[in-house]
Image (cartoon, rainbow, N blue to C red):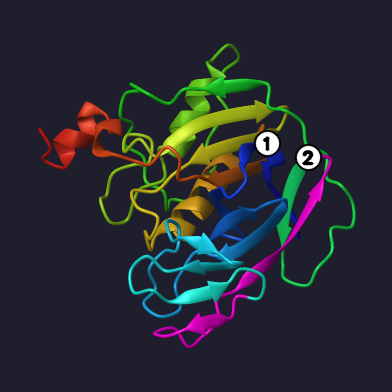
Amino acid sequence: MFERVASVTEIPPHGRKSIVVDDVPALLVRVGNDFFAIEDVCSHDGQPLTDGPVADGAITCPRHGAKFDLKSGQALCMPATRAIPTFAVQVRDGEIFVGPAGSELPVMPSVTAPAQVVEPTNIPVVSVTAASGDQVPTPAPGADDDIRLIDALKQVIDPELMVNIVDLGLVYSVNRDDRKIYVEMTLTSPACPAGPQIVQQSKMALERLRDVDEAEIKLVMTPPWTPDRMTDEAKDMLGIF
């Protein structure tokens, strides 16, 4: 299944963007007018390739120098010996779609600009657990929809820091288009092993709302997360003063 990951205008020539494909952290790379998508992990040591230099159709791991072909994923030099997964990339009407390797984009999905943006800052802490499985109730008419969406995301707890993702400052924006929710969020580091779990739990937390049919979670790494994005409550919980 193909997913829209960016507009062509978002990626400058020789630019790149961190994306998520089927809950897998990936990297979209532009070389001239060509786009490539690879799993964002070095097969040698499991480190992200995000900041690796790109030249001659290959990306180099910034840590130990392993090099991989952007099109095939093949390892081109030591210390890597195994290829990295790649994804199919197609561009239609200025939009970039990424899907399973070897597949074709059958029909252009309907992409509608979200109607409203929620700024998830300075919202009081709500003590909710992510694993309860209970449906989040729809509030009485007149309640603030933005707050409901943020409260749903506060159910998602970072398993390493044990603080919800909103108070950690990981949620950058929440958009609604009728019964579909669009979220842009980040991780405390590009190599965070809990990334796929956090993305999936965020999707489930929103889709438990009665007036939400689907939630699309987009993982971004720009701007990068820093501790100053946390709320005062989160800093207090983690002993940061």
Taking depth in this image into account, of 206 and 78 the one nearest to the observer is 78
For marks 1 and 2, the one nearer the N-term is: 1
Is residue 109 found left or right of 122 in the rendered image? right
| Residue 29 seen in render | yes
The three-letter code of the residue at mark 1 reads Thr
For label 1, the residue is 9
Residue 169, by quadrant, is top left
What residue range appears in magenta?
73-93
Mark 1 lies on a secondary structure that is helix
Q: Could you say where residue 207 lies in the image, as x and y percent from the top left?
A: 61, 43
Q: Residue furthest front?
A: 56
Badge count: 2
Q: Residue furthest top?
A: 142
For label 2, the residue is 94
Q: Is residue 33 above or below residue 155?
A: below
Q: Residue furthest bottom?
A: 81
Is residue 8 found left or right of 22 in the rendered image? right
The three-letter code of the residue at mark 2 reads Gly
